[in-house]
Amino acid sequence: KAKDLGRNNFQFFTDDMNAAMMQRLRLESAMRWAIERNEFMLHYQPQVDVITGKIRGTEALIRWRHPEFGMISPAQFIPLAEETGMIVQIGDWILRTACAQAKAWQVAGLPMRVAVNLSARQFHQGDLAETIAEILEQHDLPPSLLEVELTEGILMDDTSQTASVLDKLHGMGVQISIDDFGTGYSSLSYLKRLPIQILKIDQSFVRDIHTDPDDRAIVTAVIALAHSMKLRVVAEGVETPEQLAFLKEYDCDMMQGYLFSRPVSGDDVLSLLENDTRLKNEVAEQMKETQ
Ligand code: C2E
Ligand code: MG
Ligand code: MG
Ligand code: MG
């Protein structure tokens, strides 16, 4: 009967809701301990020059390994951290850890830029520019070795606060990029007003680049737009040689994706960089020999 069915459905629904709510609460309380229990770490994904294949920078991506729940994806816990406000504390930890790592690479003789994802709440809380200045100074890190990734969502409420924070960061020499470009609902007008240097093409446009004409159109248009505004372009989520070939053909500057490397530990980035320079030296040696 409809009534029974209704009741059963309702019952089923609430059980489901309860489970989701419980899961959320458990995650939320686990998150409160995660920093001091050392459960977070950062991985770094290389960004490579499309033409030379040389590593030009890295993106820091947070990882959470919980002793009971295992690995929890940032796509799952970052939105929750945003909602609860915990992102402010976690975001601070991310900035400090990424800057310490960039300093370690520099000290090892292989200076490499690190890009840090910022979330909306973190961006609008307090004076982010001052916090970043303090962290850079504490780690004695040249500001040009830090990049911040913003989403269009952050820029949507295009206030004077947004412009003032970005102008300060830019004035210090910190690089500014737009992440997941083209997936937000914002207008393009912020590109005129704000000091942005890099556009990152979202992986949803890159995925079917060699089969979907619409994606090809979007990617080539974004590259053209970026270059005519003197911005650099990074393609995200590059997984196949065909995608890379397309990006090369259309003059994309950099790529990031499993084709070159997954996100790896800071030490592994160092090995990648060492191989990179060794490779370069080898090529130079061979050139000398053949001359
Ligand atoms: P995002 O910033 O756009 O990061 C790119 C995501 O694509 C990362 O997922 C990365 O591991 C993944 N990826 C890279 N190459 C490939 C590829 O070739 N194929 C595929 N399928 N995926 C690839 P991840 O690490 O799971 O992060 C997901 C999102 O969570 C990030 O998207 C970012 O929005 C957020 N996030 C991650 N780390 C942080 C952080 O430290 N702070 C903040 N606020 N957000 C973060
Ligand atoms: Mg990002
Ligand atoms: Mg992205
Ligand atoms: Mg994304």
Image: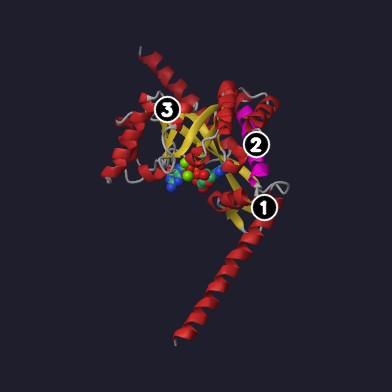
User: Type of residue at label 2?
Assistant: Thr
Q: Residue furthest top?
A: 291
Cα–Cα span, label 2 and label 3: 26 Å
Q: Is mark 2 within 8 Å of ligand 1?
A: no
Identify the mark at residue 97; answer none if there is no mark: 2
Cα–Cα span, label 1 and label 2: 17 Å
**Which quarter of the figure is the N terminus placed in?**
bottom left
> Dot 2: what SS?
helix
Q: Residue furthest front?
A: 160
- Read off the residue under disc 1: 31
Q: Earlier in the sequence, mark 3 or mark 1?
A: 1
Picture residue at 67% right of the left edge, 49% below the top = 39
- Read off the residue under disc 3: 232
Give the side of residue 251 with respect to residue 272, left or right: left
Q: Are marks 2 and 3 in contact (CB under 8 Å)?
A: no
> Dot 3: what SS?
strand
**Disc nearest the viewer among 2 and 3:** 3
Q: Around disc 2, counting alpha carbons within 10 Å, would you say few (fewer than 14), some (14 to 19), or many (20 or more)?
A: some
Q: Which residues are magenta?
A: 87-103
Give the side of residue 239 with respect to residue 157, left or right: left
Count how many numbered circles sit on residues in the image: 3
Q: Around disc 3, counting alpha carbons within 10 Å, would you say few (fewer than 14), some (14 to 19), or many (20 or more)?
A: some
In the rendered image, residue 6, in percent from the top left (x then y), is placed at: 48, 80
In the rendered image, residue 291, in percent from the top left (x then y), is placed at: 35, 11
In the rendered image, residue 225, in percent from the top left (x then y), is placed at: 35, 30
User: Type of residue at label 1?
Assistant: Met
Asked if residue 15 is positioned above or below residue 257 in the image, the reply reads below
Q: Is mark 1 within 8 Å of ligand 1?
A: no
Depth check: give the residue in front, 76 or 5: 5
Depth check: give the residue in front, 151 or 143: 151
Cα–Cα span, label 3 and label 1: 36 Å
Picture residue at 48% right of the left edge, 85% below the top = 3
